[in-house]
Image: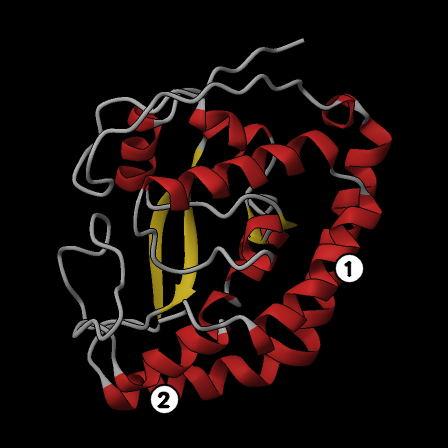
Amino acid sequence: MMENVVVKREVGHLFGESERPVSLVLEQSDCLSDTKKLYAKRVLDLGVSIFAVLFILSWLYPLVALLIKLTSKGPVLFKQQRHGLNNKPFYCYKFRTMVQNNDADVKQATKGDSRVTFVGRFLRASSIDELPQLFNVLKGEMAIVGPRPHAMPMNLEFARNIDNFMNRHQVKPGITGLAQVKGYRGEIRDFHDIYRRFRFDIFYAKNWCLLFDVKIILNTFTALVFKNQNAY
């Protein structure tokens, strides 16, 4: 059994006032060492990704790329280092939704953020900006379902405030996840926001199975339609 103690310590600028320490005991999932379940998850990831690339991204990518190029200067894709499985860094792909700036790794997008382009607002609200991560899935760096990866400087700051935060990377990061279908997406406003996401991520890591992934994928479409108010 792996014991994790989650403690709220002295916080940085993202979290405001310090709060009462909280502890939580967690156990590692047997699924993480079950090669058959890991293989089934990879088959699901490849199946969904290949289908989406062939039938959606094949025509959508050129259209989005043209809109991005016509409305702002810079590359079509935004590449950012994030922590992957076992905390191994990788470059996460997204459609570029902001003007080029030096704060992308340390400052989250906020409501009315002047860095977000006109086209970028639609891409972010619809989550179309996340679709290039299908290539990360094909490369084996991400899964369709898993904890959402954060920019590395932000991730390290969260880890300084939540003990064992990096244990969420005992599974591959995902394009969507349990926290997202529960309404936790977009800007992280305070400690409670990231802590609740962390709890959902750890619950997923402990309990994931193929049917759980399928349910999250289906619920993602519902969340995009009815719970997208935090996407900006």
Position of 193 relative to 70 (above/below): above
Query: x%, y% of residue 138?
Result: 63, 53
Which of these two is toward me, 117 or 215? 215
Give the residue pinned by disc 2.
67
Tell whether 72 sits left or right of 149: left
Residue to which mark 1 is pinned? 47
For label 2, count other residues whose C-alpha is less than 10 Å away and answer few (under 14), some (14-19) or many (20+): some
Residue at 62% across, 49% down: 178
Mark 1–mark 2 Cα distance, whole angstroms, equals 29 Å
Q: Are marks 1 and 2 in contact (CB under 8 Å)?
A: no
Indicate the secondary structure of the residue bearing disc 1.
Answer: helix
Q: Residue at x 80, y 38 (%)?
A: 39
When asked about the image quadrant of residue 220, the answer is bottom right
Can you say which quadrant of the picture contains the N terminus? top right
x and y percent of residue 187 in the render?
34, 58
Total labels drawn: 2
Number of the label disc, if any, that sits on residue 160:
none
Residue 97 on image: x %, y %: 32, 73
- Side (left or right) of 108 relative to 6: left
Instruction: Pick the residue in front: 59 or 200.
Output: 200
Q: Secondary structure at mark 2?
A: helix
Q: Counting residues from the N terminus, which is met first, the one under dot 1 or under dot 2? A: 1
Identified at 69% across, 75% down, the residue is 54
On the image, which quarter does residue 100 sit in?
bottom left
Quadrant of the rendering where the C terminus is positioned: bottom left
Seen in the picture, residue 193 relative to 12 is either above or below; the reply is below
For image coordinates 42% across by 78% down, the residue present is 123
Tell which residue pokes out farthest to the front in this image: 20
Q: Identify the amino acid type marked 2.
A: Leu
Amino acid on which disc 1 is placed: Gly
Relative to 58, say whether 79 is above or below: above
